[in-house]
Amino acid sequence: MTRVFRGYAATALLLMMTGCATVPMGTPSPTLEGLQAIRGATYLALAVGDFQVDPTADPSIDRSVNARSVRLVPPESDSFSRHLRACFRKQLEAAGKYSAASATAIDGWLTANELHAAGTSTGNGRVAARIRVVRDGRVLLEKPFEARAEWPATFNGFEAIPAAMTEYTTLYRKLVEQVLADPEIVRAASP
């Protein structure tokens, strides 16, 4: 985490010297706690289906968020919904619970994607999704999930921007871990 924060701090310093900029966010790594929870689940390997922005949401939530003067974009695609899909796949692969050929898959819609870093006392972020468990084309479960974070913020952008970027990036990992360890998801995805 410290290495990520330092990388964001260096990036923020350069950006503050040059003005507004676009930066790809870092890809969260699976945590030991998350991997243990997933490995303990009774479901076998899962496929990861399509993830899209929710049709009722503002399409702009899928493209970027702002941390003051920094425009944060998804790392491996042009879409936060596809980034969420990649996070699910990465977590399942790391836990040994991924198979593209599985008849049981998870898919979903990104319903909220927020980063508020302009404050001088606190910053906050939120990522939410509607997740489905599907087996052989039949929907077994559809459920909303949300990950939130709040952190101390300062007027000083050299500190506030890297903190916001770090906290926001972890929201995707938190959401994925929450979904994959959820008892209803585990039951629906189990044989």
Image (cartoon, grey):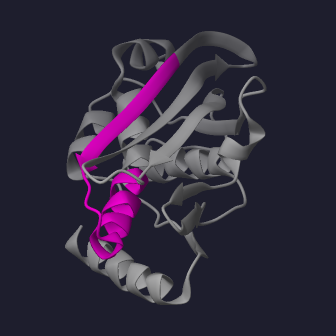
Query: Which quadrant is home to the N terminus?
Result: bottom left
Estimate the x, y position of residue 103 in percent, counting from the top left.
66, 27
Residue at position x 35%, y 71% from top? 157
Front residue of this view, candidates 59 and 156: 156
Above or below for 8 versus 17: above
The percent position of residue 71, horizontal first and vertical second, equals 59, 65
The front one of 76 and 41 is 76
Q: Is residue 71 above or below residue 3?
A: above
Residue drawn where x is 37% and y is 75% of the image? 8
Question: Would residue 148 be counted in the magenta stretch?
Answer: yes
Q: Residue at x 54, y 48 (%)?
A: 89
Q: Position of residue 164 (x, y in %)?
A: 36, 58
Query: Which is nearer the eye, 91 or 72?
Result: 72
Q: Is residue 183 visible?
A: yes
Q: Give, as a single range, the part of the protein colored magenta.
A: 144-169
Left or right of 2, for residue 133: right
Q: Position of residue 107 (x, y in %)?
A: 64, 31
Q: In this orientation, which residue lies closer to the viewer: 47 or 179?
A: 179
Residue 109 as seen in the image, left or right of residue 37 = right
Residue at the spot 47% in from the left edge and 63% down from the top edge: 27
Magenta run includes residue 70 = no
Residue 180 seen anywhere in this rendered image of the structure? no
Does 138 appear above or below 74?
above
Q: Is residue 180 left or right of residue 159?
A: right
